[in-house]
Amino acid sequence: MQRVGLPSVIVLAVFSWLLLVAPALAAPHVDGFADVPWGANVDQLKAVMDQRGATLQKQGPDRVEYLGTFANEPARLIFYFDKNIFYQGEAELLNAKGKDEPVIKKYFEEFSNMVTAKYGNAEPGGSVGQFQVYANLWRNLPTAAQPAAQAGISVVGIVDVRKKPDPNKAENKVIISYSVGLDWARAQTLPKDI
């Protein structure tokens, strides 16, 4: 029997550890939405949106809307807050709003493919009542600060398929949504000056 020296054992142990841990370390994290980190307050949101050149549209106590871009596409960006703590963001793609099903499907597939490339396969959705709904969901995604935190992403395309649909096709749209558990977001409140 051949003896194995201590350096060989250490190298083997490190190599084994890397095989087990490296995939988890390399997993992409969902740390916020549109450059706004989870747990940010409204003032921090405004600073990030000013840097991005977005235009404030509406502000309420728990929701702030901007016109800006998401993945280089014009979008209405909606940020949801609970007690001034950011926990969910949505992008409604303006180039898809009110368009026919082929355009909705194109944007849905394009954005689903982008998210799949980064986070892996999704759970598919389906039709709901009077609407054809294309939906993909990514659940239980890690965040950098806490890999066990449950963040999620959805890409949804909605097409009105009623016999007499809205002539303006206002219900037809593509929405991309990122969210994190509210309890976790509350624990991540950031200092005033990020």
Image: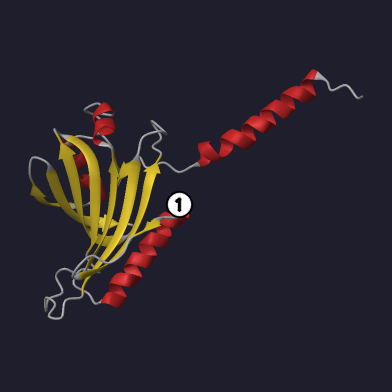
Residue toward you, 102 or 191: 102
Side (left or right) of 126 relative to 19: left
Quadrant housing the N terminus: top right
Does residue 50 appear in this view? yes
Question: Measured from the top left, where is residue 169 in percent x and y?
Answer: 15, 74
- Compared across the picture, whether 163 is left or right of 140 comes to left
Q: Give the x, y percent position of residue 81.
A: 17, 39
* Residue 140 in the figure: left or right of residue 85: right
Q: Residue furthest front?
A: 129
> Residue at left 40%, top 33%?
148
Please give left or right for residue 30 compared with residue 16 in the image.
Answer: left
The type of residue carrying mark 1 is Lys
Foreground residue among 22 and 160: 160
Residue 176, quarter of picture: bottom left
Residue depicted at x 45% and y 43%: 28
Residue sitting at 31 percent across and 77 percent down? 102
The 10 Å Cα crowd at callout 1, few under 14, some 14 to 19, many 20 or more, is few
Q: Give the residue number, with chain letter if any, for mark 1.
A: 118
Asked if residue 150 is positioned above or below residue 168 in the image, the reply reads above
